[in-house]
Amino acid sequence: MQSPLACFECGFCSRVFTNCVHLNHHMQADHGPNPITYRCPLQDCSCGTQDQASLKAHLALIHSSIRPYACPICSKAFKLRSHLRKHEQSRNHAAKFKQWAGFLEPSHDCPRNESDPLNTYTFIRTKMQQLREEYLALSPLSDATKPLESLSDLYSLTGYYPSIVLDQREVTIVPNPHPIGEGGFGECWKGIFLGNHSVAMKCARSLVPEETAIRRTSRELELYLVSPWMVNGDAREFVNRHPDVNRVVLILQAAKGLCYLHTCNPAIVHGDLKAANVLISKLGEARIADFGLSRRAITGISLGYSDTWRLAGNARWQAPELLLGLDDEKQERRTIESDMFAFGRFMIEIYTGEIPFSNFSDFAVLVSLARGMRLLPIRPTEPEVVSRGLDDDAWKLITECCHEEPAHRLPAQALVSWLEDRAQVEHYRLPRAGPIRYNPYM
């Protein structure tokens, strides 16, 4: 009988094992409970540390004068990666300025000094507003090709548009007998913005009886929420298609979006956070979407929450107070704390590529949680999952987000701070299993 393949490799001594249990025993016995998992990235330094905070302190103390980050174009070196990013942003601004100046060259009012970005941006916005007004002032029978193309080109260059309220001539629905996506609160259609840019157009589904809706048809406008088309789909699909993607960076991007919502005044509660509602742009950036359950959290004011708002959602991501507080409206109302609980479950999705409690049906999850089942799935210990970043520190972060008591859950600002520190040193981490592959999304 042929022996099983040894497919689990130790990241410290390169020994291979037939299963993860043997690998874990080996690591505990031969490398101790706290092996060195972070190695100094500098070529002439062999220092290793057990956690990212110690590595960060080592770099600041021993290598404070060394600048390891170099621009690939001009070779200018920087001490911190953030400084390199600012340098690249400045260089990109100069390149964009040349594009804008070339596009707007016929205009004598176009600013020529690229060191004055505020003046440049102000001029561009004013020019786009003028083009938009000219386009909308044309009669339906007029040739609108030139102003429409100019608006489209400027939008491509700047990513800016002068109005958040769009006219039906600026965006059109792609003919399709069925929507491209449906949820409990609306339908999503594909559209074309300015004749060239793909967008998602979401309209709310009516919750009133059909007869009442028919009577209102003659006096209601059809409204859509328009957003850029996310070509890479949702976050879980994306990480499964691109297993080498930097998952810490994706989680950080989503956390920054959540932090923005929670720090608004008043705070905005998303209400339905999960990987399916975090979309990935063409640049590989995470964007929070699907605000079907979002509400502003106004302390001391009753908003008259409907049963749909209070009871909708999936138990796989819902905080225990939403599942068990069915007799108390205040208890079952979504809060920024329930968002943080859902974000902890979202992190599990990104690290594992699977939904929480993937081996249970939705009904089984709901019943089990109501009977007091543990709030978190069993911690994944597979080497490939750990190598993606789900180590002791990351699991502790998840447990702090998913604490049973809402008041003890990690706030979004603290979450972002932790993830930013982690992202700074994530590329220093030693591989625990599997080959090292180039990551285009770092």
Image: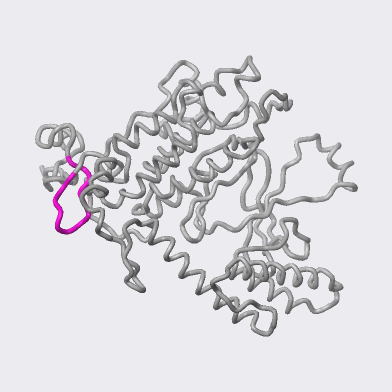
Residue that appears at 41% across and 29% down: 400
Please, is residue 170 above or below residue 385 in the view? Answer: below
Image point (47%, 15%), residue name: 371
Q: Is residue 337 magenta?
A: no
Residues shaded magenta: 36-48
List x then y, in percent, for residue 399: 39, 29
Q: Is residue 113 above or below residue 22?
A: below
Q: Which residue is rendered at x = 46% and y = 57% of the image?
A: 284
Residue 260 on image: x %, y %: 56, 43
Quadrant of res 116: bottom right
Query: Residue 271, located in which quarter of the rendered image?
Result: top right
Q: Quadrant of the C terminus?
A: bottom left
Could you say which is closer to the camera, residue 48 or residue 313?
A: 48
Looking at the rendering, in which quadrant would you find the N terminus?
top left
Tell me if residue 407 comes above or below residue 119 in the rendering: above
Foreground of the two, 156 or 301:
301
Residue furthest bottom as drawn: 106
